[in-house]
Each structure stands twice: as structure tokens, then as C-alpha cells.
Amino acid sequence: MQTRSVETRVKAASTEGGRRTRERILKAAAELMFQQGVAGTSIPDVQRRARVSASQIYHYFGDKKGLTAAVIEYQSTVKLEQQRPLLDHLDSIEALREWCERAAVRLDAVHCAGGCEIGSLASELSDIDPSARLGLATGFAAWQAAIESGLARMRERGDLGADEDVTALAVALLAAIQGGMLLSQVNQDATPYRRAVTVVIDHIADRVAAARASRSTDR
Amino acid sequence: MQTRSVETRVKAASTEGGRRTRERILKAAAELMFQQGVAGTSIPDVQRRARVSASQIYHYFGDKKGLTAAVIEYQSTVKLEQQRPLLDHLDSIEALREWCERAAVRLDAVHCAGGCEIGSLASELSDIDPSARLGLATGFAAWQAAIESGLARMRERGDLGADEDVTALAVALLAAIQGGMLLSQVNQDATPYRRAVTVVIDHIADRVAAARASRSTDR
DNA sequence: CAAAGATTGGAATTGACTTTCCAACTTCGT
DNA sequence: ACGAAGTTGGAAAGTCAATTCCAATCTTTG
């Protein structure tokens, strides 16, 4: 109902300039909401950053809730596509380590500010905006699926035992990433993140070793 | 400097009634900030919940930042003391599982609302309030220390190998708890939390088994 | 008990933010 | 080129939060 009324009010950009304006607003809002939180980001803030007037924001997004929803969608899709090449090949211990380390380097670069783009939004909005929560759940599900499918491939290949719960392992890695980033954010030091993901990946590596061992025993 | 000016303005309760009022405000603020976030909690909100007038809040806490700082301190201390009996005996796999499951039951009870009291504050404030970040880092450090000292005792006892990095294991467990709670909050289901902590504790259990095995080999 | 200090109520100030509105300006299809 | 639709600027309304202030009422203490 709310969604409907907003959607009715919103106009999709139909001209080239309009599309670029919309994009500019979205990017500015995403950056600001990431840095200062949703509540800490005002419409005037977005106006300044995107160099647009208030009417443009309301024209394209209806209201702040609509803008927030668009940012959630944006962060989910963009971040995912951005890592697609890596995400599609998370089917070895080395690939997992490489992928997690990539994120660690990014943390170092920004001095651990912000944590995870989606995680921050999730923590802030889950309890107060049901539709945002849903969007964020979808976003997380996509990451989980990427990890899980890599692990599933390892299992099919025999790197992992047939009885391994790849869902649990994927969730554990995702949780380590999120929790690790939070701890790193608070400590302004990427070490906690690195430790957390390393422990979980080590655990997966142990299971791989166990699978290998049991294979050689079978013969 | 900011801290000083605030502290100057704040009066410590010196009468019994004053102490109870202060406590009532603190508890109300803690609950509200946990449920709706710091930004989502207004002074009038706290007034209504604690049944006090604005002047009482400003009298005892100086300003909203001071109130927030007090809430951080409160959550850190209270939650810790509340679990002291369990925290002091995290020196076995069973104790770790029991402790984490205790939290899972609480998550079930509240339908996963709010996540972790400290984690939520951390995510919201780390990047925008340096002194809050510091307080939260201290809070987390206490939890980490509790886990770590339990693991260290296991190591001294020989349950864990002498070369185990108990710091890394403690951080990993803490991250699993935080990340797991976040995922559970978003999914409104404690399963992700349970999976994440189970995987990490299973990993620790594996190390215990490895230590036992190597001990029997030595003989 | 009386002065000093602590506590409280409630009004008033100030400022910011969300959202609406409308007039002006562009772009597009025909 | 012309009307319709898309886009933009900026003012303005309405709301609400943070904070200050002061007068009134308790408490403590000498």
C-alpha cells in the first residue's frame, strides 16, 4: 500500500539527462548513507552532494523512504556485479582466501570506515523498516548463494565430503565477514576481520583435508 | 574538550530520588536506543518512557551525546555482569555451546529483534562519534577477553595445543556471534546465528580433538 | 529551622528537516 | 515548429527535535 502510493508518485527518468540526474542522486545518497547512516543523511545533504534541487529527488524517488529503498537495491546489485568474476569462482580454498583478502585490503584503504555497505544498512534498518529488511535479506541471500554454490562445487568435485553442510559453512563465512568487519570498524584495524575469516576458512580447509584423508583410506 | 565541557555541566545524583531518576532515564534510553537506534530515539521519547521532564535528562546527562555515552557504558557493564557466571567458565566446548545457545534462545524469544545490544550501537556510532567508538571498543574487548581467557585455560590444561592462537579463535567466535546476530536480525530467524557459532565452535572442538590425538601419539 | 543545594516542571527558543507546490525551462514526438 | 510531457529551481508550510531557562519544590546540613 505504501509501496504502491510511492510508486505512483515516482516518475522513471525517460530522458537521457534525467537518467543521469537520477543516477547522480542515487550514487550520492548511497555514499552518504554508507558514511553517515540513513538517519544521519538528510535530503539537503544529498542535494549538495549530487548538486540537484529538492524537487529532483522527490521527482525520482517519491520520498526519503523511496530513496533509501533505491539505495539498498543499488548497493545490493552494484556490489554484487562488481565482484561477479570473483564470486563465480569461489570453489577453492585459495579463491576464498583471495576474495576475503581483497575485502581486507579495501578495509585497510579506508581505515575500516563504514564496515560493510549492506551490513551497516541492515543493522540500522532491519528493525524499523520492514520493506527495507526484506530488500536487505534478499541482498544477503545473494552473497550466501554465491559462497554456497562455490562450496557445493567443491563437494561435487570431492574436495569436500558428501555429508558436508555447505549451507552452514557459507553462513558461517558470511557471518565472519560481517562480524569481522564490525569489529574492525570499531577497532579501526582490519586485524579482527582477517582473524575471523581466516579461522573460518581454515576450518573449511580442514574439512577438505579430512575429505582427502578419508579418500585415501578408502582405497 | 567536548567531554570536559559536558562533564562540567553534568551533575551526579547526590540524593536517593535523584539516583533513581537517573537510573530510570538510563534504562529507558538504553531500551529505546536498542529498539530504534540512537538517531531514532528522541529526547521526548525518553521523557515519555521514563516519565521525566526534559530538564531532568539534561540535568543528569548534559546533552544527547552524554546520554548516549552513558547508555554505551551501561550496556557494556550491565550485559557483562549479567553473564559473569557463565563468562567466567568458558573453558570447555560444552560451556561455549551452552553460552551461545543461551543467546540463541533470547533471540528466539524476541523474534531476533535488535540483534546485539552493543553491536547495534557499534554499527551506528563507530564512524560518526569517536568517543562512542572508543567506549564500544572497550566493551567488545571485555567480551573478547572473557572468551580468550577461557580458551587460554583450555590451552594451559592441554585441551588445546600449545601453539593455538587463542586470540584469533576468540575473535572468530565473537565475530560469528555478531555477524550471526546481524544475519538473524535481517532474516528474523535465529538459524543463521546458530549455524555461524556452531561452525566456529566445531572448529575449536576439532582443535581439541587434534590436541588429544597428538598427545596419544607422543606416548 | 533556615540557607544552600538538588531536583523538577514546563514554557520558549532556535534550527533543521521533510515534503509540497508552482512557475519556468527543456526535450521529444509529430 | 508546437504542444505535451519531462525536468528543474527555489520558496514556503508544517513538524518536530535539541537545548536553554527560570521559577518552584523538595532535601540536606549546620
Image (tube, coloured by chain):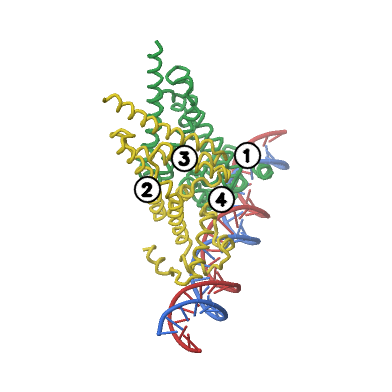
Chain colours: A yellow, B green, C blue, D red
Image location (x, y in percent) of residue B151? 46, 24
Q: For residue A175, which numbered disc appears in the image?
A: none
Is disc 2 in the same subunit as disc 4? no
Mark 2 to mark 1: distance in Å?
Answer: 48 Å
- Marks 1/3 in contact by CB < 8 Å: the verdict is no
Q: For residue B53, which numbered disc appears in the image?
A: 4
Mark 3 to mark 2: distance in Å?
Answer: 21 Å
Task: Output the chain of dot 4.
Answer: B
Is disc 3 in the same subunit as disc 4? no
Mark 1 to mark 3: distance in Å?
Answer: 53 Å
Instruction: Please state which amino acid type lies under the numbered disc 1.
Output: Ala
Task: Output the chain of dot 2.
Answer: A
For mark 3, give the secondary structure: helix
Other residues around mark 2 within 10 Å, as few (<14) / some (14–19) / many (≥20): some
- Quadrant that contains the C terminus of chain A: top left
Q: Mark 1 = which residue?
A: B12
Q: Is residue B27 visible?
A: no
Q: Quick one: B18 or A154, which is closer to the camera?
A: A154
Q: Looking at this rendering, what residue extends furthest in the front direction?
A: A219
Is disc 1 in the same subunit as disc 3? no
Q: For residue A141, which numbered disc appears in the image?
A: 2
Is disc 1 in the same subunit as disc 4? yes
Instruction: Please state which amino acid type lies under the numbered disc 4.
Output: Ser
Q: Quadrant of residue A48?
A: bottom right
- Quadrant that contains the N terminus of chain A: bottom left
Q: Mark 3 = which residue?
A: A98
Instruction: Please state which amino acid type lies under the numbered disc 3.
Output: Glu
